[in-house]
Amino acid sequence: MTIGASTVKKQGPDARELAPELCVRLHDLMLRARLLEERLITMYRQGDGYFWIGGPGEEAFSVPLGLLVDKGQGIHHDYLHLHYRASGTLLALGADPVDSMRQMKNTATDPYSRGRNFASHYTARKWNVAPVSSPIEVQYSIAPGTAMAQRKPGCKGITVVTGGDAGTAEGDFATCLVWSSRKGSELPILIIVTNNQYGISTPYAGQHGEARISDRGKPFGMETATIDGNDVETAYHGVKRAIDYVRTERKPYLLEVMVSRLYGHSSASGANFVKDEDDCLARFERRLEERKILTRAVMDEQRAKITQEFLEASKRVREEPQPEPHQIWEHVFATKNLVGGEA
């Protein structure tokens, strides 16, 4: 199934071309995110992990999101409640791709969970990235909590929450819509749904009556939009417009992003490349060639260099220590009263 330009029309301010320097940066991050996911799939197949799930096909949306948020710690910066297809966002924030390999291998050096969790379950307090939840869409009912704290006068931070289309059938999504839009108590929250038109193996049409998930925000008085998440320039402008609205108006915004699922749902469905999906990276590379921003030779050389870099990194990770049994008791209880303000 192909989704993208044929599904969502590119028009208005979203049609503006980005500066060449930004295009080069976006391409580098998108390529790294894609090659990281492919390396994680290879690690899983080689026995260096128990399960893979990730976001190849969402890079044109996830990378701009990571570049556009106000990263930092505390309510005056943006909170991120992400799901497990957010590698592009983490890399754009500044995460080390090797750390994702450590989590895949469940090493004691995994900074996200110390080997306790499986792939793509990120958390980073220094950037307000809340822990990714394995039960789907729980983050939609948690995110209003940080947004409530950001209603404090003078606060410019906002909350961003992401999830998938199938998970909008969960009550947590409805909870998010209700609590974010109460009259007089609206929350500064950007609610994002990445729609790859599948819920594991169930097609979108088999589980949704509405034409657009974004339409579900309208009865709540929310600003809404559906954008082509396979076009990086459209996605960049669409995400920026939504973030700017929430930051300025201090009200919720529901953004539906049409994306592809290039390697299926997860390793549970084989993690095989789906050739008839719209590949946002390939589309962007064709555009970069057409505009003479990057040549095919330069991009191929970059791909080969990063591929080798990730291969060597995965070999090093393979030799890193696994958690010891006694370490199960570490990081269970807080050593400081963080709620009470103890630093």
Image: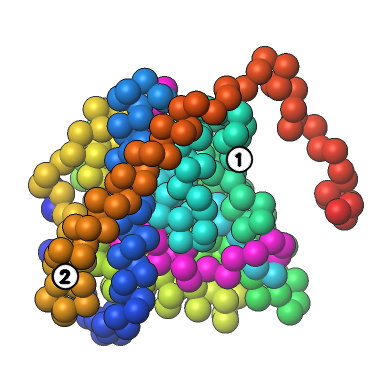
* Magenta span: chief secondary structure: loop
Relative image position of residue 117 (x, y in whole percent): 54, 30
Q: Is residue 263 left or right of residue 86?
A: left
Q: Residue at x 35, y 27 (%)?
A: 44
> Which residue is identified by label 1?
111
Q: Which range of residues does the magenta coloring cover?
A: 50-75
Q: Nearer the viewer, residue 253 or 218?
A: 253
Q: How is the image coloured?
A: rainbow
Instruction: Classify mark 2: residues with Cα within 10 Å, few (<14), some (14-19) or many (20+).
Output: some
Task: Reply above or below: 238 against 321.
Answer: below
Q: Earlier in the sequence, mark 2 or mark 1?
A: 1
How far apart are the two marked residues, 2 and 1, measured between alpha carbons? 37 Å
Instruction: Indicate yes or no whether the magenta region holds residue 65.
Output: yes
Q: From where the camera sits, is residue 146 visible? A: yes
Q: How many marks?
A: 2
> Which amino acid, mark 1?
Pro
Q: Is residue 290 left or right of residue 108?
A: left
Q: Is residue 162 left or right of residue 203?
A: right
Depth-wise, is mark 2 or mark 1 nearer the camera?
Answer: 2
Relative image position of residue 51 (x, y in whole percent): 39, 26
Residue 82: numbered disc: none
Task: Reply above or below: 166 against 125.
Answer: above
Instruction: Indicate yes or no whether the magenta region holds residue 215.
Output: no
* Secondary element at tag 2: loop
Task: Reply above or below: 218 against 3.
Answer: below
Q: Quadrant of residue 16?
A: bottom left
Q: Residue at x 71, y 75 (%)?
A: 155
> Which residue is identified by label 2?
295
Q: Nearer the viewer, residue 151 or 280?
A: 280
